Image: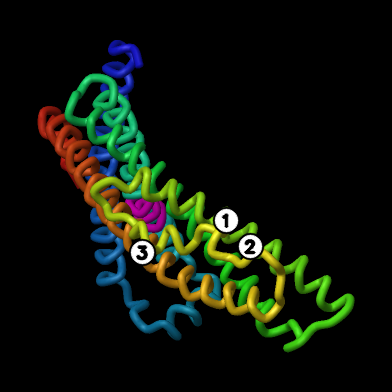
Amino acid sequence: MPQSWYEDRVRQLLDGLKALERSDEEADAARRDAEARLEKIRSGSRLKDRYLWLLVWANGDREVYNRMKPLRDEIKLRRQQIADIPHRHRTMLAELDDIITDDLGQNDPEFQALLSEQRGLRRKRDTCDDALRTISATRGNITSMSSSMPISPKGRELAAAEKKTNEITAQVGVVHEKVVKVNGVAGTYGSVSGALVRKLNTSFLSGEFRYQQRKDELDTALRTLGEVDRKVRAISGKIEKRLRELDSRRTRLVKAKRDRLLAAHGIRAT
């Protein structure tokens, strides 16, 4: 962003935050003044009993009521103003943080390196998530096939079984490709062992289709998929942990600069 725009907008927000502080102090003082005046009227009035108050008011004596009502309205208004200020304060601080983040991302080498690492880690996490979704779907299909197919299908059932197992075999092949990608991007965050990856290569299947043999092979693949799922989740968990660390560091850097700006202008940080 242009530096002049950054400086102008930061100045506007700082002025707004300073004005909010003054508004808070003024509203609180006005509230306390109205409460004191209201209490003075109450203490000097014989209408301290609620039921006596209602009786006198019902008979047309509204002098005390007319003196108290505007003060009650004033107190209510000031309390609402005071209650609204924290939300406005948080909104302005959030915008200030966004502007500081953009500025640091363009001008601070340390912050730029942090953002670059975050982008890379998110791509790694997305690769893991994509593999995990495919693993989950494939495991579900194998489980469904095992529970729904006849023990010894014949005729059309056998043809349907062959089609189904071929589809699942293709899915196992897709899982294999995606796990290879995970290993390609995981780096220091771990890997799925080569032995497990090889077990997912569809070359482990026998050539000629025999239902029971193919079913047994896919059941074996199901167990392998479970192991692979745990490995990929472990890699994803380490990546997620590092992302949280970077998010925390990023927040600290932004907050540190924001607090310096606020302190320089005599504005409370919270």
Q: Secondary structure at mark 2?
A: helix
Marks 3 and 1, how far apart in space?
18 Å
Q: Which residues are magenta?
A: 75-84
Q: Residue at x 33, y 48 (%)?
A: 186
Q: Position of residue 178 (x, y in %)?
A: 49, 51
Circle 3 Cα neighbour tier, 10 Å, few/some/many (<14 / 14–19 / ≥20):
some
Q: Residue at x 41, y 42 (%)?
A: 123
Question: Which residue is labeled 2 in the image?
Answer: 169
Question: Which residue is labeled 3 in the image?
Answer: 231
Q: Is residue 95 above or below residue 88?
A: above
| Amino acid at the residue labelled 3 | Lys
Marks 1 and 2, how far apart in space?
6 Å
Report which quarter residue 44 is drawn in.
Answer: bottom left
Question: Which residue is labeled 1 in the image?
Answer: 173
The magenta stretch spans residue 79: yes
Q: Are marks 1 and 2 in contact (CB under 8 Å)?
A: yes
Q: Is residue 175 above or below residue 59?
A: above
Sequence order check, earlier mark of 3 and 1: 1
